[in-house]
Image (cartoon, rainbow, N blue to C red):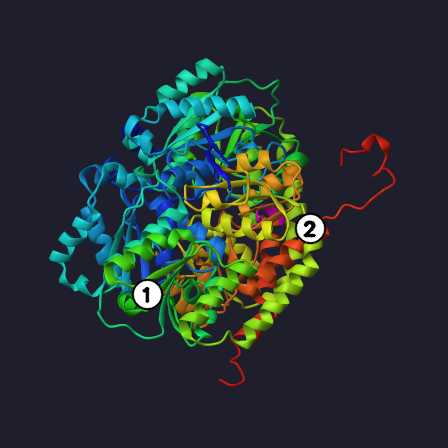
Amino acid sequence: MAIVNTSNKACTVNPLKLSQPIGAALTFLGINRSIPVLHGSQGCTSFGLVLFVRHFREMIPMQTTAMNEATTILGGTENIEEALLTLYKKASPEIISLCTTGLTETKGEDIAGAVKEIRGRHPELNQVAIVPVSTPDFVGAFQDGWSKAVARIVEDLAEGEPEVFSGRVNVLAGPSLTPADVEEIGRIVSSFNLHPVILPDLSGSLDGHVPEDFTPTSLGGTKLSEIRSMGMSEITLAIGESMRPAAETLEKKCGVPFVVFDRLTGLEASDRFLDLLQHLSGEDVPQKYRGQRSRLMDAMLDGHFFFGKKKVAIGAEPDLLFALASFLSEMGSDIEAAVTTTGSTILKKIPAEEVLIGDLEDLEERAVGCDLMITHSHGRQASERLEVPLFRAGIPTFDRLGTAHQLNVGYQGTMRLIFEVGNIFLGSKKENHPDTWSLSNAGRL
Amino acid sequence: MLARKVAEVFNEPGCEHNKQKSEKDRKKGCTRSARPGAAGGGCAFDGAKIALQPITDAAHLVHGPIACEGNSWDNRSAKSSGPLLYRTGFTTDINENDVIMGGEKRLFRSIREVIRKYHPPAIFVYQTCVTALIGDDIEAVCKAAAREFNRPIIPVNVPGFVGGKNLGNKLAGEALFDYVIGTMEPEYTTPYDISIIGEYNLSGELWQVKPLFDRLEIRILSCITGDARYREVAWSHRAKAAIMVCSKSMINIARKMEERYGIPFFEGSFYGISDMSDSLRNIARLLVRQGAPEGLIEKTEGLIAEEEARAWTRLGEYRERLQGKRVLLITGGVKSWSVVSALQESGMVVVGTSVKKSTKEDRERITELMGEDAHMIESITPKEMYSMLKDAQADILMAGGRSQFVALKARMPFLDINQERHQAYAGYEGMVTLVEEIDKAIHSPIWEQVRKKAPWE
């Protein structure tokens, strides 16, 4: 049980946090034929776009309403209109998101009203789903933007049909999941002869496939028709505490019951997930996963020597922090420092004394003498200064290949984590030398 | 006040584009603004940060919500030979309460924290959209803080919504001119002191040309701002001559330095062999005109002859491997002809080059080099680029990092020549590296494999 504190500095040093609007934008990149638009100055989009390009090493369709000083003060409806019409003509997307930014929220615009007004003038836009999301940069963090966007998507688009498709399961995929994680979750659900609708599905769009032709929108991901039919599923599985609001929205609107899995990393967490799927489907756990479970146990047996009492400092968004800290703690390591970006009910469950809402300067101070630091690529400077090895997790990871394919969930993903992290511990093992046990060192090791 | 500054920067008398405009158009300024739904570039804040962040010992504090710094920090490749403070991300990360109550107090406290913890010789404070909109007076806060903490605290008034990156470069230049340049004196001066304006030492490119100046005993008194220390920029007004490089991004500084301090400058480039030579030649002439001994010119010619011969020999080694390879060159467009000539010298054919930001003179040079039917591209969409590559109308795309995946997804070679690139391409060494990189990209064994269909297809 952790105490949650907020850093009381005036100045953030070496930010850990990313902004809300780009968190919201990324969810839309997990929907097929979509273009996220940030309603702000061109820089808001440009920074987010470059960040995602560097992280995923993929083309990122993302646009802007290109607000300037005058249009901000006078109101941005004309810019929204021009952006929507231009995108409709040039890219014919099925869905466009309109995420506000600090700039347009400071002015205080009614974007939902603006969209309605624009639709009145341009009936051709009726073919496009337009989802406005309020995501001021000066509130919350990336994870909050993601959480709000998914809730807004189901609120606006899921239809409350009375019918129920037997075996249909909604999966709300949280921001801590990589495309590989999402794919694995889909695979596990399907192996019980259940039919998952995953929202958002980055494994379809940002998995690095090489398409046959050029598309100006996202390609792959959840289909709009699937989102509309989410009200007909038997159940919603929300992966990550941040997906609870969306699951609740869907229950309220369409009556779909839900279960929240606060993480899918770790033996027991994976067991709980498969156990539920077994009950839901009435099918036995497939042989494949029994095999994987056995291999994971073996990895835990082989690996625990190297994890025991290791001191780890983690900086990550709440859902990811919870998953990683719990995993490490279950392997016998101690979470010496836990720093996060924004508030969440999950934080108090993190196995550390304190969870601090802060920045990488806070993490660096607390990581002195630790055996491992885990955070995104921006932790590289601190890691070099402290000479503490860095395991990269989270967005952005721009100085490593294959970030989309890092699997951290299920038996398979937990096993991979044990190997990756365990190998860092193995590689940084300090050799004993004649002075190791010298009397002047006694008791100080 | 910001509006006046922006208008002034737009009506730049030194700018070739501007000179070609009618009196009326000139008054309108360079107002081409980003189009909603079809914009691709960064904002003025981004441009200012690119231009000033290479000052390595200063703290760069961004006053705004988390997006501006949090989403972008430590993502540029400007290198330092010493201090690393410039790579630390500082931001006031304002919250909802600040938006309502004003963020000036938080900014002042932030400046105090940065000084207490990091002791920088100076702090640059960047204004952003939200804090500009709520009326935070960063000039006043910086003035008060400078007095209180007894060191330069420089306001850089660049809310993103005033325009694009290039405007931001220039506004950064204005901040340097208004607050930094001329505020310190170098320990000594020599007749061989120059300043380089608009060189940011990306991937260490300054270090590709510095040895040349060192050989000629020309001293880089200040580089604005590549691998700079704050004091070097502050005493840059004591240079005897200046080179302005990089797409006129800081032409306003060069012109004002000439007007106020009588420092003559010329526009040069370190990209391309003949350009590098011309730059050396011109700076030597300017220095001699300013009183340096005549012998410098001969010495310079000697170095040029030696280095050019060495570079051409090395490039010649690639001629056979690269003969006839077709390059599609999409850059900002400025001076792309200087790269064109080096590519041609290595046997390659430039099948198209962008000219969006090139001047009339640049276009004439391109026609001269590439012939009458030179394919000059005003603007090209990613889809068009993809089609050109997919139809194999080019063997390699050289462009900025954003276009990387356009080429790669068409299963065609790509070379990043923009500011996020990891290779240094300046000077004679850089041109050889560039051709080496093209050779590696084009002749990678992967192309044949990834273009083949699977056996069952």
Q: Nearer the viewer, mark 1 or mark 2?
A: 2
Which region shows up in magenta? B422-429
Reply above or below: A276 against B212.
Answer: below
Does label 2 lie on the same chain as label 1? yes
Determine which quarter of the picture holds residue A345.
top left
**SS label for mark 2:** helix
Circle 2 residue: A425
A280 drawn magenta: no
In what quadrant of the picture does the N terminus of chain B appear?
top left
Visible in this render: residue A255?
yes
Question: Which amino acid type is shown beneath numbered disc 1?
Answer: Arg
Circle 1 residue: A33
Across and down, in percent, residue A321 comes to 50, 48
Is label 1 in contact with label 2 (beta carbons under 8 Å)? no
CA–CA distance in space, label 1 to label 2: 43 Å
User: Crowding near pointer 1: few (<14 within 10 Å), some, many (20+)?
Assistant: many
**SS label for mark 1:** loop
Q: Residue at x 60, y 61 (%)?
A: A416
